[in-house]
Amino acid sequence: MKQARIFSVVVMLAVLCYGAVGFYFLPRATFQGELTRMALLPETLFGWTKAQPLIDMRWMEQATMQEADVLVIGDSFSDGRIWQTRLTQQGYKVRTESWNSMRGICADFMPWLRGQGFQGRFIVLESIERNLENDLSKSVACEKMQYHPNARTDAPRHPPATAFDVHGGNYDGKLSTGFRTLLHTFDYQRRSRSDGFRTWTLPNDVTMARVEGGCQLFSHASCNDALFLSYDLPGEIGHSALDNIALLNARMEGVTPVWMFVPNKSTVYRYADKRFWNEAEQRYGAPNLMRMMQRALEAKTVDLFPANGTHVSTTGYLLLGDEILKVLQRDQHK
């Protein structure tokens, strides 16, 4: 009987200790970025700290299809309507649709688009590198437009945060999340002290990599290291993508297509020798976003891609918008 009581007390104490440790470290598991959340690493180490530009919400307004000068079809890099503010500030009326709604540039795209009332000249087709081959091939194979309306398409967008408190946290999560974040932090501190540390594969398709000159390029506390998606690979984009662009351009008579291929974060910081953007620029006049980003790094642009996320910062979005604006202005008088 006495042994059973002792065992019960020991078990209770163990549970209380686990709970206390988990509760104490739970605020560290309040994540601002996708990659810190996926990897269970704290924002105190990987959250950006340099203030970002403030976007005026009035420039983020959505135009109707009938009044738009520019139609943007894109993914999550366009959904926030941030880079588009560079266009709207110059008087362009911009409508943004998602690939999920449009499904592709199908064979009957132009008759369908004119039927929707679009009379603008420019169509910006944006895709992140990791998806562009699939986006292009799906469009080439598509025969008939099947638009899928989404209530979010015309919902207001709000400016991204200019700053956040990396030490701010709450106690809304699971105790196990705080505990696992603590263990990952200890593991990181142990690994990063090694002279040979270069990369570390974490759970949920996240890779940590040491970045040369990282503390000149990032504002987070552990600025020598940054987080990346593990499935963003070093290989070159298939040449069929370039041929598919020509096939899709032929479907867009009467408008000017602008192909906006956003490099993966891993490509920008780790695999910068890819040539796809040079070739797309030479063949189709596509904006060379890879070159722009490399020049931004050479100029020591801080947090072009924040370490804790997969998307560019507000600074990065505005640089993207500047490149698209240059193309529109270049082609405006042709």
Image: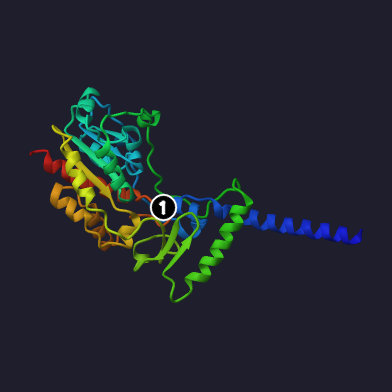
Q: Is 237 situated above or below 298?
A: above
Residue 266 point in image, percent of width and height: 35, 58
The residue at 80%/60% (across/down) is 10
Residue at numbered disc 1: 309
The residue closer to the viewer here, 56 or 112, is 112
Residue 110 point in image, percent of width and height: 20, 29
Q: Is 245 situated above or below 295?
A: above
The residue closer to the viewer here, 59 or 119, is 119
The residue closer to the viewer here, 21 or 232, is 232
The residue at 32%/39% (across/down) is 81
The residue closer to the viewer here, 260 or 90, is 260
Q: Can residue 83 be seen in this view?
A: no
Q: Is 325 situated above or below 97?
A: below
Is 310 positioned to the left or the right of 289 in the image?
A: right
Q: Residue furthest bottom?
A: 195
Residue 227 occupies quadrant:
bottom left
Q: Is mark 1 on a helix, strand or loop?
A: loop
Q: What residue type is labelled 1?
A: Gly
Q: Residue furthest left?
A: 334
Residue 142 occupies quadrant:
top left
| Dot 1 crowding, Cα within 10 Å, few <14, some 14–19, many 20+ | many
Is 132 positioned to the left or the right of 334 in the image?
A: right
Residue 189 point in image, percent of width and height: 52, 68
